Structure formats: structure tokens, C-alpha cells
Image (tube, rainbow, N blue to C red):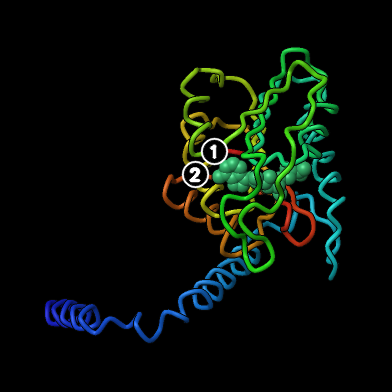
Amino acid sequence: MKSFLFKLNAVAKNILIIIQPHVLLSFLIQPFAFISNFISLTKWIAQQPKEGVYKEAFSLLRNYNHRIDLYNYVINREQLQNAEIIYIEMGVCSGGSFQWWMENNQHAQSQFHGFDTFEGLPESWGYFFKNGDMNAAVPELADARGHFYKGLFQDTLVPFLTKGTISIGKRKIIHLDADLFSSTLFSLSMLYPYLEKGDIIFFDEFNVPNHEYLAYKIFTESFYVNLELIGSVNNYYQTVFKVN
Ligand SMILES: C[S@@+](CC[C@H](N)C(=O)[O-])C[C@H]1O[C@@H](n2cnc3c(N)ncnc32)[C@H](O)[C@@H]1O
């Protein structure tokens, strides 16, 4: 019976490949992917612990400033104000969050590395943001601990990592704020060999089903990485994990 079903499965699949369903049904790819990833996201949310995690009260509207509450929560919980950290921000734009972290960590040996095209998004993000949106001049850096790397992550991150700047044993704070699935998954995959227990990973648009959430899901499932949720604001829009 099992071998019959196995053969039937192969025959059905081969017939479908010949029929080429995409010719008529391509319009279903995007909505089906969105529905599937959205259901996966709400299921994931339902499975998260109710206690011991920073979370604000439910609100219908999003307040982007609440991400600062999340940064403050993490910096206090993990005692990062005076700790030596390596802060890596993927998606800097005009440098708002990058500046916040430099101002709120005082350790003279801390390093702050920011990556961006500074020419905007390399692809459209959903319906509202197009390729080239969010372009900004490279921000001025008054603090010698900060460094920017201009260009696509896909061109700048590997050369940066292979230079050996990211020493194992130093606390890393990784801030994923590139919005896109491709950029987020690429960053996580390249940073994976450097991740250590206790490192912190922020997602700035986590609850977007086809982008950062999908990158998180594929990354954790493919690399068998255990990320512990420690906080979120704006109904999981900004979400932070600790590497276990
Ligand atoms: C939302 S903005 C970052 C905002 C910033 N972190 C803040 O809070 O002030 C997203 C940025 O990601 C950058 N970005 C996205 N994908 C990228 C990629 N593959 N390579 C380089 N930059 C990328 C865009 O250029 C854009 O400036």
C-alpha cells in the first residue's frame, strides 16, 4: 500500500509538472505565501511563553518609539551600559538606532559596525516601499568606535567578517533592520558561525510574515539555532531574542 501511494505521488507530481499550473495560477503564489506565513506567525506567537518576557499591553496602533523601551529593557536586563560589546546593525539608513546604541553603551573598547547601501532598499518591500526607498546620506560619526560599510550586505559583510574583526568570546548585539526577507536571511546565515550563547538579536520588523518572520523561521529551522524570546513591542513588530 505504502509503495503504491509512493508511486501515485510521483505520477501525480510528474503530471502536474507537465501541465504547468503556473500558466493560469501564478497570481495565487503571493496571497497563498502570505496566508501560509501569517498563520505560521500567529501560531508561533501563541506558542511563546506568557511569563518572563518583556511585552507591552496590546494596542491596535503601532508606536515606533516603543522600540526604545525595548532597547532600554535589554540594556538594563543584560547590564550592557558599561559592558564591552560588538554591535552590528544590518540596515542603518539615517542612523537613528545606531546612534542610540553608541550613546547608551559607554565601554571604550566597544565596537559599532553599521551596514547599508545608503542608496535605499535593493528591492521592493511589500506594496508600500519600492527599490531605492529609504536612501540616506552616510551619517556623520563623531564617535571613533563606530564604522559604516557602504554597499550591499551581499558585497560587504563577508569581507568584513573574514578580516577577523568579530572576535569570539565578545558579547554581540545584532540588530536586523533591513526589512527584507533576502537581506535578513543573508545576514543571519553569514553571522551564524560567529553566534555564541548570550548574544542578542533584535528584529525591527519581525511580525511581517513574508519578510523578517520568514527569515527567522527558515534560519532557526535550517541551522537548528535556538533563539529564546526575551521581549517584544508593537505586537511583535520589534522583537528581541537571546542565543541559547
Ligand atoms: C528601515 S531602514 C534602517 C533604519 C535604521 N536602523 C534606524 O532605525 O534608524 C532599512 C535599511 O536597510 C537597508 N538595506 C536593506 N537591504 C539591504 C542590503 N541587502 N544591503 C544593504 N542595505 C540594505 C536599506 O538601504 C535601508 O536603509
- Quarter in which the N terminus is drawn: bottom left
Q: Is mark 1 within 8 Å of ligand 1?
A: yes
Residue type of the residue flagged with mark 2: Phe
Q: Is mark 2 within 8 Å of ligand 1?
A: yes
Q: Which mark is residue 186?
A: 2
User: In the image, what residue occupies the spot 87% across and 50% down?
Assistant: 65
Residue at mark 1 to residue at mark 2: CA–CA distance: 8 Å
Q: Quadrant of residue 180?
A: bottom right
Q: Could you tell which of marks 1 and 2 lies nearer the N-terminus?
A: 1
User: In the image, what residue occupies the spot 15% across and 81% down?
Assistant: 11
Ligand 1's quadrant: top right
Residue type of the residue flagged with mark 1: Phe
Q: Are marks 1 and 2 in contact (CB under 8 Å)?
A: yes
Any part of residue 230 in sight: no
Mark 2: secondary structure? helix
Q: Say left or right for 218 vs 45.
A: left
Residue to which mark 1 is pinned: 153
Vertical comparison of 66 with 11: above or below = above
Vertical comparison of 147 with 18: above or below = above
